[in-house]
Amino acid sequence: MQINLLTRTYRYDGIDLPVPPHLADEPAALRSYHATLFPAILNAEIVDAGVSGTAHLIEYRRAVGTKG
């Protein structure tokens, strides 16, 4: 048996976002931090994109719809 450590990678619009170590275990705080970089993340859906290599991908996907 082999144990592989996975790192979480957050992605928005094809861009890997930074994960400060002090926020790595707090998803709500991390989302707020990422929203300072891209404000649309506040309304985005969080999608588990699975594992790729040694990274667990988590994507913010823009909400699609109409206003009003």
Image: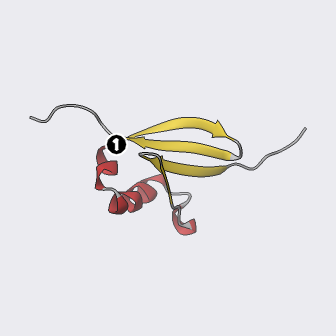
For the residue pair 58 and 25, the one nearer the viewer reads as: 58
Q: Position of residue 12 (x, y in %)?
A: 43, 48
For the residue pair 63 and 31, the one nearer the viewer reads as: 63
Q: Position of residue 19 (x, y in %)?
A: 53, 61
Q: Position of residue 37 (x, y in %)?
A: 36, 61
**Is residue 64 placed above or below 7 in the rendered structure?**
above
Q: Which residue is mark 1?
A: 44
The furthest residue to the top: 65
Which residue is rendered at x = 57% and y = 43% of the image?
57
Query: What crowding class fits label 1: few (fewer than 14 Cα within 10 Å), some (14-19), or many (20 or more)?
Result: some
Which residue is rendered at x = 34% and y = 42% of the image?
44
Query: How many labels were placed on the picture?
Result: 1
Query: Which quarter of the figure is the N terminus placed in?
Result: top right
Query: Which quarter of the figure is the C terminus placed in?
Result: top left
The residue type indicated by label 1 comes to: Ala
In the figure, is residue 10 to the left or right of 43? right
What kind of element bears circle 1? loop
The furthest residue to the right: 1
Which residue is rendered at x = 29% and y = 55% of the image?
39
In the figure, is residue 22 to the left or right of 39? right
Q: Position of residue 52 (x, y in %)?
A: 66, 40
Image quadrant of residue 45? top left
